[in-house]
Image (tube, rainbow, N blue to C red):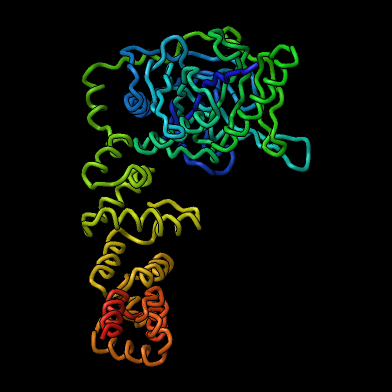
Amino acid sequence: MDYEAIIGLEVHVQLQTKTKIFCSCPTTFGALANTHTCPVCIGMPGVLPVLNRQVVELAMKMALAIHCNIAPFSLFARKHYFYPDLPKGYQISQYEFPLAEHGWVEIEVNGQGKKVGITRIHMEEDAGKLIHDENRPVSYVDLNRTGVPLVEIVSEPDIRSPEEAVSYLKKLRQMVRYLGISDGNMEEGSMRCDANISLRPRGQEEFGTRSELKNINSFRHVQKALEYEIRRQTALLLDGQEIVQETRLWDTAKGVTFPMRGKEEAHDYRYFPDPDLVPVEIDNAWLARVKERLPELPDAKRTRLKRQYGLSDYDAEVITTSKPLADYFEECVARFPSPKTVSNWIGVELLRLLKQEDREIDTCPVSPAGLADLLKLIEKGTISGKMAKGILEQMYHGKKNPREIIEEQGLAQVSDESALSAVVDQIIKAHPKEVEKYRSGKTKILGFLVGQIMKETRGQANPKKVNELLKRALLS
C-alpha cells in the first residue's frame, strides 16, 4: 500500500529582547549557570510577573510577516507539568486566546511552490535547561533560560515530505532574521522544532495516529528524523500493527527515534488563565505602528532585486538569503553599478571565503567599498580577474585595500602595447612550429602561445591586449 506522510511543525523561536518576558533578568546566551535569575523567573512565592511590551511587538511582527490575523484580545494561561527545569511547576503560555491565527508561509521544493497554513502564533516563556554529566549519572539544572521569551508557531498539517519540512523551517528562520526578532540559531537553541507526523493510505481523507518528535535542533536532523519515522511507521502498518500515539526523541548518533512518553493532550496540562497577568489588548493604532516598522521581507526583496537590477532567479535567491547579504550587495552596487558582476563576485568568491570560516556576511573583513574598488580595478584593466581573486583573499585575511596590495606586490597588469609587443615577438620567434600550425588553420594553438606570454610576464599581461597583439602579429 502507498502511504502519504502528514506533517505539522511546532516551531519555538527565542525573541531577541534584552530582558526576559516577565522580569528584568538579561537574556544573554552563554552566561555562567544560574546567574541570570531572580525570584520572578524561578517562581518564588509571592512574586508577580510583568509583561515585557517588546515581546508583544516582536511577536506581532512575526504574525504580520506570515499573514496572520492578530487578535485584539489575547490571554496568558498556566500550562502545568512537572520537570526539573520548570521551577514553578507550570509554564506561562497562551491557550484558548492566542496572539494570532490563520496565516500562511509560501515555500518551494523542486521548483514547485506551496502554501503551508499557520494555525496560530502564541507567546510563552522558555523553560530552563538540564546539563547531563558525562561521567556520572547526574544532571544539573541551569535556570538562566527560564523566562526567556518565545513565540510558538504552529503549522497546519499541510507538509507532505521531509524536504518540505526543511524548506518551511528555512523560510521561517530567514523571516525571523529579516525581521530582526531572533538569530534563529538552532544549535544554540534559539530556534527549536517539534514535528508531528502520521501516515495514511494515499487518497484517504482521515489522518492516521501521529507521533511527536521533540526538540530537534538542525535542518539535517529534522529531515533525517522524519525520514526514519516514515520508514518506521510504514513498516508497522504493512505488518498490520497499530501506531501508538506518543512523544519520541531523535538519537543523532544512532539515527533512530525512540519513545519518551505517551503523548499528552491539552487536558493533561490543566490549562487555566493566569490570574497574575492582565489580558493583552491590541488596538488599531498600536497595530499600525508595528506595521509601519516592518522591513522589506525576503519575497518582496527578491522580486524587487530582479526587477531593479535584472538579476536571475538564482542570483536573487542567493543574494536575499539574509538581509545583511542583500544590504551588502546593494551598497556595493551603489559604488560599482554592474549588478551582475557584483552578484557573481559575492555569490562565488566572497561566500566561498566566508564558508571556509563559517562566518556571516556581517562579520566579513572585506567591506562593500573594498569589493567595489577591486571591481573598478578589473574594469580599468589595472588587474585581471584571475589576479583579483588572489587580491580578494589577501583583503579578506589582511584587511588591506586592493590598491595597497597591488602597489606593495607589484601586481599591476601590463597593458602597454610596446612592452607587450616585445614579448609577443619573443614568443613567436621561440615557437616557429606552433606559429606555422596556427597559420595553417589550427587556431586552437593560440591558447598555447597566449599561455607562454602570460608565463613570461608572470601573469601580469593584460589578456585582452595579448590576444589582440598576438593575432595581429601572426597575420602579418
The N terminus appears in which quarter of the rendering? Answer: top right
445 or 440: which is nearer to us?
A: 440
Position of 52 with respect to 6 (left or right) is: left
Numbered-mark total: 0
Q: Say if 68 sits above or below 452 in the image.
A: above
Work out whether residue 255 can be spotted: yes
Position of 471 with respect to 318 (left or right) is: left
The C terminus appears in which quarter of the rendering? Answer: bottom left
Residue at the extreme front? 440
Residue at the (30%, 91%) spot, across then down: 422
User: Could you say where residue 264 lies in the image, as x and y percent from the top left?
Assistant: 62, 13
Name which quarter of the figure residue 464 lies in.
bottom left
Work out whether residue 324 can be spotted: no
Residue at the (42%, 19%) spot, across then down: 117
150 or 277: which is nearer to us?
A: 150
User: Could you say where residue 125 lies in the image, as x and y percent from the top left?
Assistant: 49, 25
226 or 49: which is nearer to us?
A: 226
User: Could you say where residue 298 lies in the image, as x and y percent from the top left?
Assistant: 33, 37
130 or 195: which is nearer to us?
A: 195
User: Could you say where residue 336 lies in the image, as x and y percent from the top left?
Assistant: 23, 59
Name which quarter of the figure residue 18 lies in.
top left
Q: Say if 20 sits above or below 435 in the image.
A: above
Residue at the (29%, 48%) spot, across then down: 327
Name which quarter of the figure residue 253 lies in.
top right
Residue at the (59%, 10%) spot, across then down: 265
